[in-house]
Image (cartoon, rainbow, N blue to C red):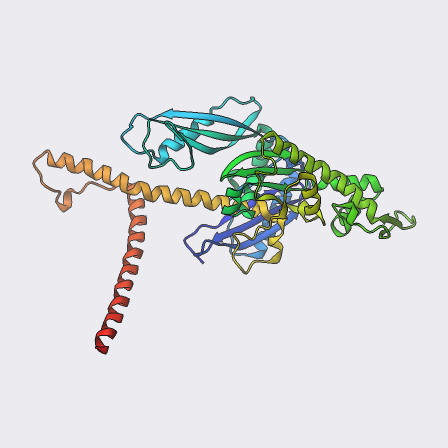
Amino acid sequence: MNQEAPIIVGLDIGTTKIAAIAGRKNEYGKLEILGFGKAPSFGVQHGMVLNIDQTIKAIRQALENCYASNPNLEINEVYVGIAGHHIKSLQTRGDIVRSDTDAEISQKDIDQLINDQYKTVIPASDQIIDVIPQQYIVDSLQNITYPIGMSGVKVGANFHIITGDKNAIRNINRSVEKSGLRIKDLVLQPLASAAAVMCDMDFEAGVAIVDIGGGTTDLAVFYEGVLKHTAVIPYGGENITNDIKNGLGVLKTQAEQMKVQFGYALADEAKNNAYITIPGLRGQSPKEISVKNLAHIIQARMSEILDFVVYHLKQIGMDNKMLNGGIILTGGGSQLKHLIQLTEYTTGVSARIGYPNEHLASGHTDELTKPMYATCVGLILKGYNDYENDKRALEENYVKINTSYFAKEKAARLTDDSEEWTEDEQPEETADARQHRKAAERNASLKGFLDRMKTKIIDMFTEEEDAKL
């Protein structure tokens, strides 16, 4: 395992469960799971925290279970998923005019472009959660995916901005902070799930991620490597359970058990003569439930959810001909029997179940490959993406920082007719420059070691050939 890589923790605060997973990438780029814990969630409804005390208890219980799986873990900060019907999105366009047109476009220009979008006017009760660039424009060149290193005067981009209700976000922050943790970042749940279940080909082909959670169904649409649309549908597995409870006159726990064990998303696949016997209440006789009737209730609600998916796809012009990768179903609700057939029938698009094992290393428990943990695994991947981007930026800036600093000092010395510095006259290195230098020296040391090994191997084979001659 790569001991230099950080341990990153994803915290999924859901309507039915709260899960905490700790992971670290190994030397092959795969995610090693170091800790896992979950707990029932009682303070969250439709993705929103409505009871902070109960949510805090559930978070602490999930953390305790995570520590129990690995007592050596130390968890201080987490990446947290966010969902709920308060989530909204909008499309914007931003541009900047660069002052130094001779220099190439840098990450600093892109950061300025993105930061400017946080000034976008939105309702006073909302807050911007994320700004996601879609495609860049450099002068007259359009549809650019990576403008860094190019030359140009005007740099612009189309953005997908995700917003949420301020109070809902505050309640999540308070629940996590009062549990003794710090939020590293809030991530929209369908984007986290997409990272866990998608590969590069899916991004290019065009797919719709449908994450069926307990309180909401989250949608994210990708096409040609670009996030095209996000939406939160205010129905999920809890609604199906309540429909069964009310339609069949049973307890909620019984309704949940029947849904999981005997539920069908397609009523035509259920047997007509199959029945479920459940115990009666307070001495009443046992009740028999038709599996066919149960399936009709489930199909009615699932069809409604999928109708919303079709509506959103039509809104953005993503008809079935454009989604070559089809629909990827994930989340706990995706485990309903025959849901793939119902999805294909309703949407006219091919469908499959998305399992979060695309980026997992071997050796983890089978439970973690269930679709219900896609969000949590995706949160860890999001954290690693941030870490690797920051590390890359530090290493790229090291040369620029030191080159500029020492060049100025040397130029100043040469104006005093001094050809070069003496050892005592070397300028003092800054703390940032020292940190970047050490990182670069480690990389150079590794490269030097590999080069020496390569030379020795070549020499060894050369000596053997000479001996034969």
Give 185 or 240, whichever is nearer the viewer: 240
Identity of the residue drawn at 27% across and 57% down: 448
Q: Is residue 340 left or right of residue 30?
A: right
Residue projecting furthest to the bottom = 468
Identity of the residue drawn at 62% across and 41% down: 210
Q: Which quadrant of the structure image shows residue 255? A: top right
Q: Which quadrant of the structure image shows residue 151? A: top left
Locate the C terminus by quadrant: bottom left
**Percent x, y of residue 96:** 38, 25
Q: Is residue 178 among the parts visible in the rendering?
A: no
From the viewer's perspective, is residue 274 above or below residue 115?
below
Q: Is residue 439 left or right of residue 33?
A: left
Q: Is residue 128 left or right of residue 38?
A: left
Give 367 or 28, whichever is nearer the viewer: 28
From the viewer's perspective, is residue 376 above or below residue 118?
below
Residue projecting furthest to the front = 321
Give 404 or 88, whichever is nearer the viewer: 88
Locate the N terminus by quadrant: bottom left
**Percent x, y of residue 9:** 52, 47
Identity of the residue drawn at 48% across and 30% down: 159
Q: Is residue 295 among the parts visible in the rendering?
A: yes
From the viewer's perspective, is residue 355 above or below residue 102?
below
**Percent x, y of residue 414:** 11, 36
**Percent x, y of residue 319:** 60, 35
